[in-house]
Image (spheres, helix red, strand yellow):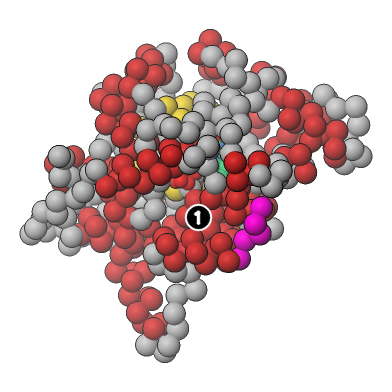
């Protein structure tokens, strides 16, 4: 990413809103709907039924996904007037990466189901907006190609730690070589959740060789195969299913990562204060409060409900990030008010990707930053750090 401090910070709100109304003078309407409900409905029209089931679905009765949204209603904003926030600066630095706003893209697998450019589109879009991307272990392109598309953008790598430590180590070394500034270990997917929308159509993308490009491009994985993935894609897909996750993963295993790299290690999927305290106590460098968008444990609490406990347990010793349920700028604002250093955007950018490739992802991220910027202007907050808990009406 270009040096954000060299340029004045973007005032996303007036810039994006102004451009829409200006184009409207000649009759043009935004290609990407500006509300989440409009975005989701338009994307559903465009997506295949398999892609829609995979993206929009969640575990079991989908109660944890519903809880994610309900949690935001528990923390309404009580706007403060006359705060003098005429000049705002949304820039944020996180794990040594500079960002134009306190947002980044979540790692999302199998994006080729939504658009052929998949992760390459996300890489280009995040670079243009100036926010980091988290490259998924289940990406549709090898991380080296994604990094190329991302150019001087900021990037992190998300690791699924499966049955093979040697493969996990190889992924970490590759991520370091392509300039990722932190490794996010996703803890909540040591087995694939029970997802009725996918089960009922019998659709498992990985078995069709979708979303396994990090594996088929990896020397350690390739050495596990009798033939190359090019010669025998079915055998590669089957081998992937044998090793991709491991419910036996524990604290002792993941501690090994510190002998493989000096990059910051962030634990994604922490939902309890005691786990967060242990993570920091064992020397991990950051936490993402997340329930994977409700896709793993049905019946679970909403992710935002877990955020205050985790922030209290971490007590300033490491950055706490947040995802799961963010749909608009006010949601970002609430997570920051509850102590998140930055948030990760999930399904909304996937819908932008489905609608318009890289420009769709860029537009969705800019809308979110614009709404956040206006929420800050209208509540007297000049910087993300200036958004304090007392701006929320805590019942
Ligand atoms: C995900 N998520 C995810 N997480 C991860 O660590 N690696 C991955 O490959 C994926 N893949 C993935 C695919 C799809 C289709 C979805 C919707 C989610 C979880 C993701 O990073 C994030 O935690 C959630 O998307 C947050 O929830 P919302 O805000 O999208 O509802």
Q: Looking at the picture, how far across and down is residue 344, in whole percent?
A: 43, 44
User: Is 176 positioned to the left or the right of 22 in the image?
Assistant: right
Q: Looking at the picture, how far across and down is residue 166, in whole percent?
A: 70, 19
Which residue is at the front of the view, 360 or 70?
Answer: 70
**Residue occupying image coordinates x 39% and y 64%:** 35
Q: Residues within 10 Å of mark 1 (few under 14, many from 20)?
A: many
Element at label 1: helix
Magenta segment, prevailing SS (helix, strand or loop):
helix
Q: Which residues are magenta?
A: 46-50
**Residue occupying image coordinates x 50% and y 55%:** 349
Which residue is at the front of the view, 22 or 297?
Answer: 297
> Which residue is tagged 1?
349
Q: How many labels sit on residues?
A: 1
In which quarter of the view is residue 211 placed?
top right
> Looking at the image, can residue 266 be seen?
no
Q: Is residue 8 above or below residue 111?
A: below
In which quarter of the view is residue 395 placed?
top left
**Residue occupying image coordinates x 43% and y 38%:** 64
Q: Is residue 152 above or below residue 64?
A: below
Q: Is residue 73 above or below residue 374?
A: above
> In the current view of this chain or complex, which residue is farthest to the top?
252
Q: Looking at the picture, how far across and down is residue 254, in whole percent?
A: 54, 17
In which quarter of the view is residue 46 placed?
bottom right
The reply to whether the magenta stretch includes residue 39 is no
């Amino acid at each position: 990413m270009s040096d954000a401090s060299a340029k004045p910070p973007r005032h996303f709100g007036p810039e994006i809103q102004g451009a829409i109304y200006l184009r409207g003078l000649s009759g043009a309407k935004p290609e990407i709907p500006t509300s989440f409900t409009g975005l989701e409905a338009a994307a559903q029209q465009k997506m295949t039924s398999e892609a829609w089931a995979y993206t929009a679905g969640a575990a079991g009765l989908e109660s944890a996904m519903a809880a994610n949204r309900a949690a935001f209603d528990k923390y309404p904003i009580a706007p403060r007037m006359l705060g003098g926030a005429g000049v705002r600066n949304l820039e944020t630095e996180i794990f040594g990466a500079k960002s134009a706003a306190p947002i980044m893209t979540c790692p999302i697998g199998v994006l080729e189901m939504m658009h052929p450019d998949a992760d390459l589109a996300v890489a280009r879009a995040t670079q243009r907006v100036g926010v980091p991307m988290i490259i998924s272990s289940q990406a549709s392109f090898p991380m080296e190609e994604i990094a190329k598309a991302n150019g001087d953008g900021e990037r992190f790598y998300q690791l699924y730690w499966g049955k093979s430590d040697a493969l996990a180590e190889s992924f970490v070394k590759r991520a370091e070589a392509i300039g990722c500034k932190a490794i996010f270990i996703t803890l909540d997917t040591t087995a694939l959740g029970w997802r009725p929308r996918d089960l009922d159509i019998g659709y498992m993308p990985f078995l069709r060789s979708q979303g396994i490009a990090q594996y088929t491009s990896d020397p350690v994985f390739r050495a596990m195969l009798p033939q190359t993935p090019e010669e025998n894609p079915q055998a590669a897909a089957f081998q992937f299913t044998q090793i991709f996750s491991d419910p036996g993963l524990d604290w002792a295993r993941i501690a090994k990562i510190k002998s493989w790299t000096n990059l910051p290690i962030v634990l994604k999927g922490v939902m309890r204060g005691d786990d967060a305290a242990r993570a920091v106590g064992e020397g991990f460098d950051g936490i993402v409060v997340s329930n994977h968008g409700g896709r793993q444990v049905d019946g679970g609490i909403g992710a935002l409900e877990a955020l205050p406990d985790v922030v209290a347990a971490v007590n300033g010793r490491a950055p706490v990030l947040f995802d799961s349920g963010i749909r608009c700028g006010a949601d970002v604002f609430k997570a920051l008010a509850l102590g998140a250093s930055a948030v990760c955007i999930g399904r909304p950018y996937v819908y932008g990707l489905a609608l318009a490739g890289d420009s769709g992802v860029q537009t969705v991220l800019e809308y979110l930053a614009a709404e956040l910027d206006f929420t800050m202007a209208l509540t007297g907050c000049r910087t993300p750090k200036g958004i304090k808990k007392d701006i929320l009406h805590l019942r």
